[in-house]
Each structure stands twice: as C-alpha cells, then as structure tokens.
Amino acid sequence: MSRLSVSFLSICKKIAVVIIFALLIMLAKYVLFSESRPASNSEEYLVQHGIKKGWENELIIRGVALKFPAGYPVNPYTDRDKNIVKGRADSVETSIDVNSDKFMPPKYASGTVQIRISDKGSEDSESLADYLKYTTKGAGSKVENLELNNYITAGRGGWANLILEPFDGTKTPMGGRIIFSCNGKSLSSPGGCRTSYQHSSGLLVEYFFSGYSLSRWKEINSQVVSFVDSITLRREI
C-alpha cells in the first residue's frame, strides 16, 4: 500500500473518531436535557410559568393578558423550554363546566369543554374552504334536530370523519363560518368534536367537547365565547 493511501486512511480514521465523539457529546446533552426537563403541566412546569393551582392566575400570550379566576385549571405551554418566562406562554389550556347555569370550573367529565388559547393560527375563510374541499365530497344533508348540516366526508377518518356546520346563520364573533370536526363512525355514535375561532385580540381559540353534546352546540359555543371574553383583560403595550 502506498504512503498516500496510508495517509488517506489515517485521515479518514481521525475524521471518523471526531464525528463519533461529537455525536456522543450531542447524545449526552440530549439525555441530560431530557432528564432535567420538567414534564408539561407538572408542578415544576407550572411554577416556571408562574402558575399556582387553585389561585387566580394571569398569563400573557402574544401581548394579550388573560386572567383566570381561582379554581380554573391553567395549563400553559411554551414551545421551547429555554424561552419559558414567568407569566408568559405560547398557549394555554383550560376547561369549563357547561352543565352549570353559568360557566364554572369543571366538575364532571360529561359537561367539560376543553379550551385552548394560542398565538398560532387565524380565522381564514379561504383556508377553511380548502379544508372542506379536501375533506368532503358534497354538501351533505341537514340534520334538523341539531340545526347542523352534515357533510359527506371523504372517509379520511380521525377528526374529519364527521364534519358539521350550522345552517341557522350562527357565525363566529368575527362573522366567519363555524365548522365542527368530529371523530366517530356516525352521528349515532360520535366521539369528540372540536372547532375554533379568532378572538378580537388576535388569539386563536379552539374548544373540544363530547360528540354526545352536539345537541347543545349553541349553548357550548355561547359559553366558550363569553368565558374567553371574560378572561381577556387587555393587550400589553
């Protein structure tokens, strides 16, 4: 073997050793980071965001201040752990009990509506039209007792397995269309349902509820909108 070949092999071995060493360092950092990283919504994670369970809490999302009354669950989330700051988050999840006369902290699973407020997404009529075009085959039929139009879906399963829209003229606070995406095989055995709208503050509001509560969609929508309005204090200057 020539000296040139030996030299080349030696260089390759050195490069390989350097690469392996670098990968080991990266792996070690990942393991250490994973072990030290608090789980989302753990006590430590909540403390890092300045949240106290059972207390009145205030959280700022994209410059919008939200104030949660005592007793409501407040589960903040920040995309990157290094960006966690007390009193701030990229999104937050809470829930209300729609079985009560007025929105209250959840007591029973059957009446619980999960609400997620985030700085990601917007109410876009064109995107919604594209979504319906992709997930449905036709206008479907009216379900008179629900006052919802049941679209014929493209059979993609998941959340798009059942798609419904009010035909009574009910709109989002910004005047957009309300679309309920539900899982489950049919309206006789629905799973969970969800929809979203954009708040006047600019934040996106998503809410999730049991498909068996579809008959109460007007009440649920009204309570969610009222609740989010009530906790939205101001836009930070």
Image (cartoon, rainbow, N blue to C red):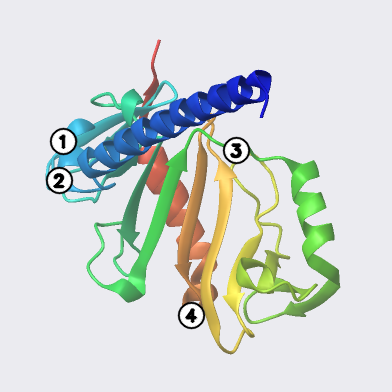
Mark 2 or mark 3: name the one nearer the start of the chain. Answer: 2
Q: Which residue carries the number 1 mark?
A: 47
What residue sits right under mark 4 in the picture? Answer: 212
Q: Which residue is mark 3?
A: 121
Whether tag 1 and tag 2 are in contact, CB under 8 A, the answer is yes
Q: Secondary structure at mark 4?
A: helix
Foreground residue among 120 and 111:
120
Q: From the viewer's perspective, is the residue at label 4 or at label 2 nearer?
A: 2
Question: Is 196 drawn above or below residue 234 in the view shown?
Answer: below
Spatial CA span between label 4 and label 2? 33 Å
Q: Which three-letter amino acid code belongs to the residue tagged 2?
A: Glu
Q: Image point 29% across, 30% down: which residue? A: 59
User: In the figure, residue 99 lies in which quadrant?
Assistant: bottom left
Q: Write down the residue under mark 2.
A: 43
Whether residue 79 sits left or right of residue 6 in the image: it is: left
Task: Look at the numbered disc 1 and give the secondary structure of its residue.
Answer: helix
Name the quadrant containing residue 200: top right
